[in-house]
Image (cartoon, helix red, strand yellow):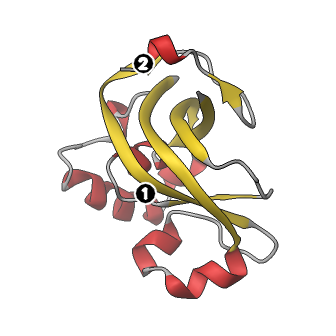
């Protein structure tokens, strides 16, 4: 299965259903199953006010601190169903969704659907861009 690495806490936001659009600098023509891998690094946003808003959303899902979010692991499986320019997406999304991504002009929104959070993270090495994960690793 194809996979992408995403910095925490955004990877877990996808797994918990808080984020449905992953913004990227490049378009993709791929459609189909996609594993969401939490990268080894947490985003730099953890040091500013944005982090506190993010934490509020996670508390509703039972997460009390960012340190609880797994790193270097697959946290969810979903379907990548569409890819659209962010300029055409931004106005159609909720404010909550917009703050989970970079919707500046020239970027693309990868539309995720049918997200299934894994009961237990599957620890493995991630890579930039698409990479393959053995199907036998996934439940």
**SS category of the residue bearing label 1:** helix
Inter-mark Cα distance, 2 to 1:
25 Å
Of residue 31 and residue 4, the one placed in the foreground of this image is 31
* Furthest residue in direction front, as rendered: 32
Q: Position of residue 62 (x, y in %)?
A: 17, 45
- Quadrant housing the C terminus: top left
The residue carrying pointer 1 sits among few (fewer than 14), some (14 to 19) or many (20 or more) residues within 10 Å by Cα, namely: some
Q: Which residue is mark 2?
A: 122
**SS category of the residue bearing label 2:** strand
Q: Position of residue 38 (x, y in %)?
A: 51, 33
- Left or right for 41, reference 28: left
Q: Which residue is mark 1?
A: 51
In this view, 46 is above or below 91: above
Q: Going 52% across and 34% down the picture, which residue do you hit? A: 35
In this view, 129 is above or below 60: above
In this view, 128 is above or below 65: above
Q: Going 54% across and 39% down the picture, which residue do you hit? A: 33
* Furthest residue in direction bottom, as rendered: 91
Mark sitting earlier along the chain (2/1): 1
Q: Going 36% across and 33% down the picture, which residue do you hit? A: 67
Q: Position of residue 6 (x, y in %)?
A: 58, 41
The residue carrying pointer 2 sits among few (fewer than 14), some (14 to 19) or many (20 or more) residues within 10 Å by Cα, namely: some
Quadrant of the image occupied by residue 39: top right
Q: Going 29% across and 60% down the picture, which residue do you hit? A: 57
Q: Is residue 71 visible?
A: no
- Left or right for 14, reference 22: left
Q: Is residue 130 visible?
A: yes
- Left or right for 60, reference 117: left
Name the mark on residue 25: none
Q: Position of residue 56 (x, y in %)?
A: 27, 60
- Quadrant housing the N terminus: top right
């Amino acid at each position: 299965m194809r996979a992408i690495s995403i910095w925490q806490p955004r990877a877990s936001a996808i797994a918990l259903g808080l984020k449905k659009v992953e913004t990227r600098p490049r378009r993709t023509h791929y459609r189909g199953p996609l594993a969401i891998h939490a990268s080894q690094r947490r985003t730099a946003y953890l040091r500013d006010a944005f982090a506190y808003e993010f934490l509020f959303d996670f508390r509703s899902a039972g997460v009390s601190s960012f340190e609880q979010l797994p790193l270097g692991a697959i946290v969810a499986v979903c379907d990548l169903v569409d890819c659209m320019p962010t300029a055409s997406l931004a106005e159609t999304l909720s404010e909550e969704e917009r703050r989970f991504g970079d919707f500046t002009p020239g970027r693309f929104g990868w539309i995720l659907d049918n997200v299934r959070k894994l009961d237990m993270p599957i620890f493995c090495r991630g890579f930039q861009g698409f990479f393959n994960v053995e199907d036998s690793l996934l439940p």
